[in-house]
Amino acid sequence: MLMEKGEIIGIVLQKSEANELQGLIRADEEINIGQLLLIDDSEKLSLVRVENYEFLNEFFDERGDIAKSILKEPSIYEILDMNTIIKATLHLIKKYDHNTTPKPGSFVRRLPEIKSEKDLLSFYGIKNKKGLIEYGALAGSEIPLLLDLNAITMHVGVFGETGSGKSYNMRYLIKLLSNIKIGDKITALPMIVIDANGDYIDLASTNLDIVSKGRGWIKRYILKDPKEQNDIKLTIDLSIFTPRELSEFIMSLKYGEASYNTLQLNFLEQVLANHDSKEYNTLLGTAIGIENLRNEILTMAQNKDIGITTSTARGIASALEIFKNKVITRLQLVNSSASLTENTLEVIWRNRGLAIIDFSAEGSPGIDVLTKQLIVSYITRLIFNYLTKSKYNGNQRFLGFVIEEAQNYIPSVDYPVNANLTKDVLVTLATQGRKFGASLILVSQRPAFIDKYVLSMINTFFFHRIYHEDVRYVMSASGGLPESLTRNLTSLETGHIIISGLMSIMKSPALVRIPWDARLGSYAGNVERIDLILSEG
Ligand SMILES: Nc1ncnc2c1ncn2[C@@H]1O[C@H](COP(=O)(O)OP(=O)(O)OP(=O)(O)O)[C@@H](O)[C@H]1O
């Protein structure tokens, strides 16, 4: 390694288990679990991760006189401080051009200062940065973590409790994926973002320049009249769905998921199946079409041979009325010439575009979870169809699909949402999509509520601070996150993230900090200080 080495902050005491060292570190050194440090054994360098640490003091004996006098006499803290040291467990993750375990007495150093690209390459032991993007900085240093863009199709999870910084991280990732430098060119990964709370919509308006260097097409899809230049009214084409799926959706709107009457469901399915799927947009997408369908059903109920009662038919008719009010009259969601189609995906691809589907109360007033699922299901199908057709025609395409509040679309059995419409198609996209260039980026506050099978297909994890309840689940699903790191996930600071998995060139989990950038931080989810706002005006 050619670069300068970081400052000495401690020494290695002994080797404990395989790949684990015990070390002593200065007490005034700010270290964090998951942070990387360098071990210097007479110029043989190794990289280690802080797996655990504790403060030790030679006076520590709770029954001793000194302990008692500490409580009586605060000034003794100074003496105590002088005699305190950090004992740390360090996990070996990389040896630089040697194959020996650092001996006791080796120096523990901070990570080096990186002054040039050459330093960066030698730090990571690589020849060039092709396909790699710089992300944040390894904790306790200014060294960016390098992420392998080519592993993004192995799917990504961004998990953390409310307020842990997921949206900011996602905005940062979108910024990076919108400014990918390849040679002299700046390009971008084509992306569709399901924006649950309007945290990304400014990227299509006031903060467009953050993402526009590598992109030629940036739009926000909303469910109200578009007023801004880059706004598009979202409409979808129902002919992509089966009669069963549409019937389940319509009956669920009235009765709740899985609480509908199967007789009604089956009958509606049968009636829809009698029509050509091309008719669905007029039949279900217009007030007249729905009126005709209702009449068709009520008339059929008169015919005793058909075998449904008038009350069954009325139940269906009333569900259709609710569907009309919620989805057609209010949201005007259906149109045979939909505003988002496979052709749109081709436009997104060609322009390295970004489509933000705004589900916030402002962009889509009155939208419910079921209708969000219908839309996500529709988009997932478009993506799958588009990418598979392109690949079979010899044109490999790539598309990143960011889904916030992923538990609403691919819930685990413990989560009180069924998501019949989205779950299967998203599982298919996760399993097969990677071959065709689909990259799922799932964002959630509660990874424990995401379907285990889908979670097992995620190969890169960005862990923010998570809830205690999620720890066990995360350990089993993420595969390979060491126990002490996992336990520490519940107390991570906002802005600190443990990154593990295929995209991280480190290959081993590491603690990374993402710098705060005020412009990137100005978004809907950003919580203003209540005291400051109240004191204004
Ligand atoms: N890297 C960071 N450095 C400093 N502050 C940050 C950082 N990331 C986020 N924050 C702050 O933390 C707060 C919460 O961040 P953010 O909205 O991204 O959290 P979240 O996990 O998306 O929350 P929710 O699940 O409720 O949407 C914001 O007010 C933001 O200002």
Image: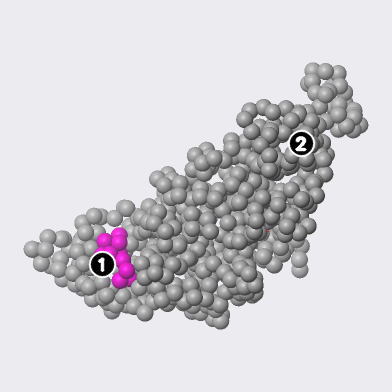
Residue 462 percent across, percent down from the top left: 58, 51
The outermost residue toward the right is 75
Of tags 1 and 2, which is closer to the observer?
2
- Label 2 beta carbon less than 8 Å to ligand 1: no
Tell me the residue at 81%/39% (across/down). 9
Q: Is residue 35 left or right of residue 471?
A: right
- Marked residue nearer the N-terminal end (1 or 2): 2
Q: How many marks?
A: 2
Q: Report crowding for label 1: few under 14, some 14 to 19, many 20 or more residues within 10 A (C-alpha).
A: many
Q: Amino acid at mark 2?
A: Asp
Colour convention of the picture: one colour
Residue 43 percent across, percent down from the top left: 78, 40
Residue 71 percent across, percent down from the top left: 84, 27
Q: Is residue 304 left or right of residue 18?
A: left
Query: From the image, which quarter does the C terminus lie in?
Result: bottom right
Q: Which is more toward the observer, 29 or 409?
A: 29
**Is residue 123 a member of the stretch shown in magenta?**
no
Q: Is residue 512 left or right of residue 457?
A: right
Tell me the residue at 51%/48% (across/down). 447
Whether residue 55 is visible to the viewer of this picture, yes or no, is: no
Q: Which mark is residue 41?
A: 2
Q: Which is more toward the observer, 450 or 508?
A: 508
Q: Which mark is residue 317?
A: 1
Q: Which is more toward the observer, 139 or 304?
A: 139
In the image, residue 74 sits, relative to residue 172, either above or below, namely: above
In the image, residue 196 sits, relative to residue 482, either above or below, namely: below
Q: In the structure shown, which secondary structural element does the residue marked by tag 2 occupy?
A: strand
Distance from label 1 to label 2 (Cα)?
79 Å
Q: In the structure shown, which secondary structural element does the residue marked by tag 1 occupy?
A: helix
Magenta span covers which residues? Answer: 238-248
